[in-house]
Amino acid sequence: MQQLPLPLPCLFVAWGALPAIPMASPMPSLPPPGEPQILQLLTTKVFHDTTRAADTQGTALLGDVPTHAMDCGTCPIRFHQPWARQGLSPKQWGDLEKAIHLYLALITNTVVTVVQGTGVSFPFVIQILMGCEVLPNGTSHSFYQSVRDRHDLVRFNLATGEWVAAPGDEMAQRVRRSFSQDRGTSSRLRFLLQNTCVAEILSFAYYGKETLKRQERPVAMVFARQPPIASKLPLLLVCRVTGFYPRPIHMTWLRDGEEVPPGPGLNSSGLLPNADLTYQLRIVLAIDLGAGHSYACRVEHSSLGSRGLVVHWGPGGNWGVGLAVGIAISLLAAAGLAAVLWWRRHRYTRPEQRDSMGL
Ligand SMILES: *[C@@H]1O[C@H](CO)[C@@H](O)[C@H](O)[C@H]1NC(C)=O
Ligand SMILES: *[C@@H]1O[C@H](CO)[C@@H](O)[C@H](O)[C@H]1NC(C)=O
């Protein structure tokens, strides 16, 4: 196997010379969380060319709650949640920050060194997803994977300590070789993900209890879309629910009090994020007005207790004028909603970027 020159050996020395990475166990007595908790550290690096330093951005999420972030490869850790800093002393955070800066510089140098001659051209984006999950019985598992422009690059097998390259990718092979040669960094990274990360989850779950238990009640609205007038299309009933937290929710359409089973007439928007860390969801039912059924939307969510929420649709037996007015109002509401959604989508791009990483 061809040996690549090690990029910047001094970095390895610096990394290797770091005192033990902090928080092996900052709070040994902290219990495992009551619910499974996952901490994801997302790093994005944009490589412009061989000479310019890569633009780096890092975000940590506990479940869907942003806890801390790093705005550049040499920036300080910035806390999104006051409780996020509580599990460690300022000195320990400082040491961790230094370790992360070295690690980020190492990645930049490795990538810039190995990319030449692989046919990969600038600019490109490398995204790294790493972290760990802790279950209520105290077991945990850790993960590390990376992509270049959405193609798999390398994965770190935490169980064996081996780097695994995406098959058939020359750059991935070279990155793997370079990382594999650096046993010191690999073992420290492993320690970081299997110990430090788990300790962070325990401290976050303990100090951030209130945030993690947050309950926001959904607001439900039912309206009709697409008037059937002069068209053969069925009327679409929309049940839109927004502003709820946490994510798990169960929504169903009731026809004459009976749940409408999944089928071609039933559609869902899928869960969509709002800007305030709440969610929205729409379910759409195509109906045949002539059949004279009654319809209602039922919402079940942890914030609502066991009773849930039922919103009835329609003015009752007489569909005439009431329906037309209802449809006109609903169309206005839908247009307003579309405008709001458009605005949000264009203003708040972060969740989309997260999605686009396939996370
Ligand atoms: C912990 O829980 C997970 C998921 O419920 C299970 O797969 C695993 O075997 C459990 N481990 C132990 C040691 O109980
Ligand atoms: C369901 O909704 C999606 C997205 O709004 C749409 O593309 C699709 O055509 C819908 N399917 C049906 C059967 O209405």
Image (cartoon, helix red, strand yellow):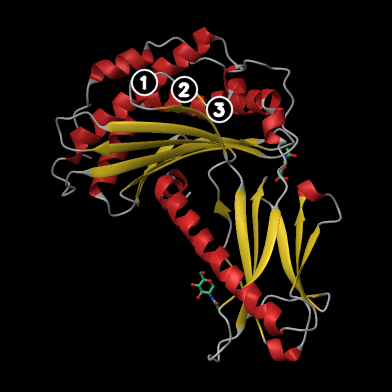
- The residue drawn where x is 23% and y is 48% is 170
Please tell me the numbered disc located at residue 155.
Answer: none
Q: Earlier in the sequence, mark 2 or mark 3?
A: 2
- Amino acid type indicated by mark 1: Cys
- Amino acid type indicated by mark 2: Arg
Residue 210: name its quadrant. top right
- Please rate how many residues cluster around mark 1, counting C-alpha atoms within 10 Å: few if below 14, some from 14 to 19, many from 20: some
Tag 3 residue: 197
Q: Is residue 355 above or below residue 83?
A: below
- The residue drawn where x is 36% and y is 20% is 75
Q: Taking 74 as reference, is 95 left or right?
A: right
Which residue is more in the foreground, 203 or 180?
203
In this view of the protein, can residue 285 be seen by the observer?
no
Q: SS for tag 1?
A: loop
| Spatial separation of the CA atoms under disc 1 and disc 3 | 20 Å
Tag 1 residue: 75
| Spatial separation of the CA atoms under disc 2 and disc 3 | 17 Å
Tag 2 residue: 78
- Amino acid type indicated by mark 3: Cys
CB contact under 8 Å: marks 1 and 2: yes
